[in-house]
Amino acid sequence: QVQLVESGGGLVQAGGSLRLSCAASERTHNSYRMGWFRQAPGKEREFVAETAWSARYYATSVKGRFTISRDNVKNTVDLQMNSLKPEDSGVYYCAAAINAGTPFTYWGQGTQVTVSS
């Protein structure tokens, strides 16, 4: 059972930056599929970014502004968010799967990101 804890959310003005971090309770390997999702009020949870092995994937809406990175020594996966927009607001969730070819199985509790205009 992998436990995930997010941190780094907060309130920021449009155009600003935030860095989210997700700490895993056990050692993560490059084969682990690690990702970030977000959910705005009244909307469904949506994919933001993920990484497995050396590959990184991003939602079209965040490509070029967000960067996902992982540290397998610290067992963390971070999301650097730049040029933030009000529509980036929501609860951001960290997710993990032990195998890169399987659906996300483990989820964190989420961290709130609010971008003011």
Image (cartoon, rainbow, N blue to C red):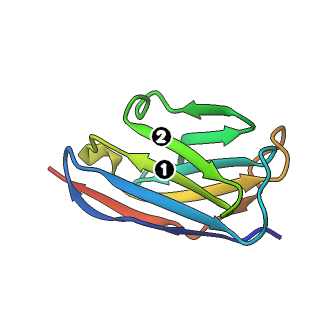
Name the spot of residue 16 as percent of width and height, x first.
23, 49
Name the spot of residue 102 as percent of width and height, x first.
83, 43
Horizontal arrangement in the rendering, residue 87 relative to residue 28 (left or right): left
| Residue at figure coordinates x 53%, y 43% from the top left | 68
Residue identified by numbered label 2: 67
Q: Are marks 1 and 2 in contact (CB under 8 Å)?
A: yes
Q: Residues within 10 Å of mark 2 (few under 14, many from 20)?
A: some
Residue type, mark 1 in image: Leu
Q: Residues within 10 Å of mark 1 (few under 14, many from 20)?
A: many
Name the spot of residue 45 as percent of width and height, x first.
53, 50
Horizontal arrangement in the rendering, residue 88 relative to residue 55 (left or right): left
| 12 in relation to 49, above or below | below
Residue identified by numbered label 1: 79
* Residue 47 in sight in this render: no
Q: CA distance from mark 1 to mark 2?
A: 6 Å
Residue type, mark 2 in image: Thr
Name the spot of residue 50 as percent of width and height, x first.
62, 41
Horizontal arrangement in the rendering, residue 75 relative to residue 37 (left or right): right
| Residue at figure coordinates x 41%, y 35% from the top left | 62
